[in-house]
Image (cartoon, grey):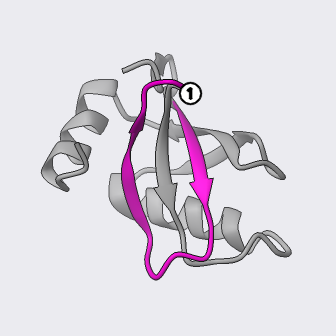
Amino acid sequence: MKAVTEIQEGILVDIEVSTKSNKFEIAGYNEWRERIEIRIKSPPLKGKANKEIIGEFSKLTKNPVEILSGLKSRQKTLKIYNMSKSDFLKILDINNVF
């Protein structure tokens, strides 16, 4: 999966966001765009969507998360600290994402 890249501090995760869903969910993997598709409840206003993404990924991984790029875009790159690619993929697998 090319959406997840291991770096020294943790991992980088490329995502594509759809807003105004009924709940937060990781919908799958877009092979064409090489991004993990996520759905969020919040609208893209005043940083609400970005806060939800950071909060949900922090809860899911139990690690600090920041948005490295795409603050005003549907396509974003997240940095998840202190996590390996294999641990992240296990979390996705446990939560029946793929």
**Magenta stretch, main secondary structure class:** strand
Residue 39 at x, y percent in the picture: 50, 63
Whether residue 62 appears in this view of the structure is: no
Residue 29 at x, y percent in the picture: 39, 37
18 drawn magenta: yes
Q: Quadrant of residue 87?
A: top left
Residue 98 at x, y percent in the picture: 22, 42
Q: Say whether residue 63 is left or right of residue 88.
A: right
Q: Say whether residue 39 is left or right of residue 29.
A: right
Q: In this figure, which residue is indicated by the disc labeled 1?
A: 33
Q: Residue lying farthest front?
A: 32
The number of numbered discs placed on residues in the rendered structure image is 1
- State which region is magenta: 13-32
Q: Nearer the viewer, residue 58 or 22?
A: 22
Question: Where is 30 relative to 21, above or below?
Answer: above
Residue at coordinates 77% horizontally, 42% vertically from top-left?
Answer: 70
* Kind of residue at disc 1: Arg
Q: Quadrant of residue 4?
A: top left
Q: Say whether residue 47 is left or right of residue 77.
A: right
